[in-house]
Image: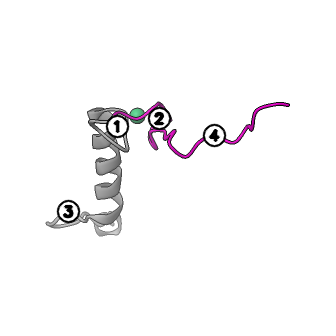
Amino acid sequence: MSPNPVRPASVRKCPICSKPRSEAHTPFCSQRCRDRDLMRWLDEGYVLPGPTIDPEDEE
Ligand SMILES: [Zn+2]
């Protein structure tokens, strides 16, 4: 009989680069990927304060 192809739930991968995650940086593999995920989250959900440049204002 062949082994079950379904991976055990304990095997988790880094959501950024799909490498095996590190215990120290779970659920990521490294501090770099942790920062990347944070930066992506900030870029999507955080608006920088201050004046925004409107491209139509130049005309
Ligand atoms: Zn990673």
- Assign a secondary structure to mark 1: helix
For the residues labelled 1 and 2, say whether their Cβ atoms are less than 8 Å apart. Answer: yes
Range drawn in magenta: 1-22
Residue 2 placement: quadrant: top right
SS at badge 3? loop
N-terminal of the pair, mark 3 or mark 4, is 4
Q: What's the residue type where badge 4 is placed?
A: Arg
**Which circle marks residue 7 in the picture?**
4
Say whether mark 2 is within 8 Å of ligand 1. Answer: yes
- How packed mark 3 is, by other alpha carbons closer than 10 Å (few <14, some 14-19, many 20 or more), is few
**Mark number displayed over residue 48:** 3
- What's the distance in space between the residues labelled 3 and 4, CA to CA? 42 Å
Give whichever of discs 1 and 2 has the lower sequence position. 2
Cα separation between marks 1 and 2: 7 Å
- Residue 59 in percent (x, y) is at 33, 66
User: Which residue, as the protein is rendered here, is positioned at the far front?
Assistant: 1
Q: Counting residues from the N terminus, which is met first, the one under dot 4 or under dot 1? A: 4
Q: Residue at x 37, y 40 (%)?
A: 28
At mark 4, the secondary structure is loop
Q: Is residue 27 above or below residue 55?
A: above
Colour scheme shown:
one colour
Q: Is residue 37 within the magenta segment?
A: no
